[in-house]
Image (cartoon, rainbow, N blue to C red):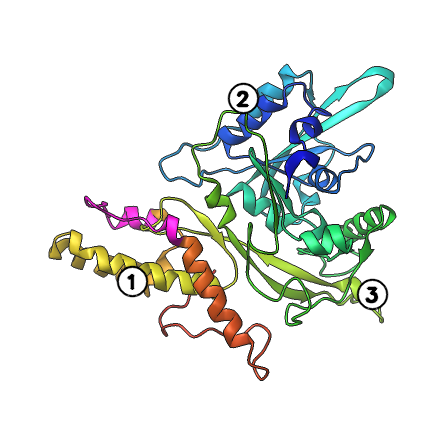
Amino acid sequence: MHNQYWDIDRALSRYVQNPKKLRSLLAKTEALISGSFAVQFLERVEWEGSDLDIFIGSRSVAKDHETPDASILFSFLMEEGYKKMKPKFGIQDYSSPLIVSVDTFVRYGMGGSEKKVQVIITDRLSVQGIITQFWSTTVVNIISWNKAYAIFAKPTFLDHAIYPTNMHKCIDWNHDGCKNHDALIEKYEQRGYHLVADADCNDRSTPFNRPRLVSDASTWTIPFDVTDVEPSSIPATVLEHSAFDFRTSSSQSASDPSPQPRHTWQLITANEFNHCTLRYTYTAGGCYWPGYLAEHLDEQFAFQMGKVSPEKAHAYLTCLLRHHGPMSQGHNTWEIWEDIGFEEPAGWVYEDERLGEAWEKFLKRFLSVRSDPESPARPAIRVSPYRIIHL
């Protein structure tokens, strides 16, 4: 897609005078923009009263990087004339337990106009806060320092469809969390979108019938002009190869004898995944892709054990099995490798650059199994019996 129609600096200039510096800070802190701003940017419209949502993680995707520092963004916003406001709402207004805090900054202009920026700190990676916390697919879009990703591009920007997601609080439809979802749906219906309330991830015609990557064939990816923007030290492929999956959930109201169709939603899962053969942490939801990837990386790990002494190789494998049972159950945190004293030997090969190839092989396998008319839309892909990841 040509980016002459999507000028990110012009769009950000509604909120800041120095958009390039903001983008440089996004790169430095691994922060991402999402929410209604991203929808407007991709739709090429402007809605009055909308704010700018910036997500920043509590940890870096790189094991040798320090924790991202949100105070850098705070200082920049105050230099831009914003004032930090006392919270008017709590983190309970967000669906995901990954949201740690929400800091609101407001700048008042002529005639009482105001601009609002919210810095949303997540408990883990910034991308997890976006994928797993928003109320519908409509707002699951990502803007990084150098690219925009319309993750549900066709349903959102061609079909103008709303698929409810991540409605964790809807034990009862009368719960305040559900009412908040209802209000958000009505707001977007007024903006020209329509609700699709009964989608099922087992239905091949829905956007939820397969695991996804942030930047795959279903995503529109728009590169930006990065002139005068300080680049990130993290490759864009770390975000782009972060994966997620779906599970259809529903809530039957105890007080409503005939629940509305919109009680059905998609739970989007995106858990951390790392391994000693990866330089960076990625996300991987569900069990299909994590199980496949764990087996693939286990093999690469075993192949490289020839680079260490037999004593160390035996000690590493023994410690992994003793501490965590099956090897693949231990690939979701670097601390495991630190606990067993793993040290990368000379000539250690990382698999990050080959993740795209591994994904294509996995997806081909997934789709070939599913192509059998007798198989379910989301088949169980057989891996070794002990390769079961508990997420």
Residue at mark 1 to residue at mark 3: CA–CA distance: 48 Å
The residue where tag 1 is placed is 299
Q: Secondary structure at mark 2?
A: loop
Left/right placement of residue 166 relative to residue 180 reads left
The crowding category of the residue bearing disc 1, from other C-alpha atoms within 10 Å (few below 14, some 14 to 19, many at least 20), is few
Q: Which residues are magenta?
A: 335-354
| The residue positioned farthest toward the bottom in the image shown | 374
Q: Please name which of the two marks, 1 or 3, marks the residue nearer to the observer.
A: 1
Mark drawn on residue 348:
none
Do labels 1 and 2 touch, CB within 8 Å? no
Q: Earlier in the sequence, mark 1 or mark 3?
A: 3
Residue 37 in the image: state x and y as whole percent.
71, 37
The residue where tag 3 is placed is 260
The residue where tag 2 is placed is 228
Residue at mark 2 to residue at mark 3: CA–CA distance: 51 Å
Q: Please name which of the two marks, 2 or 3, marks the residue nearer to the observer.
A: 2
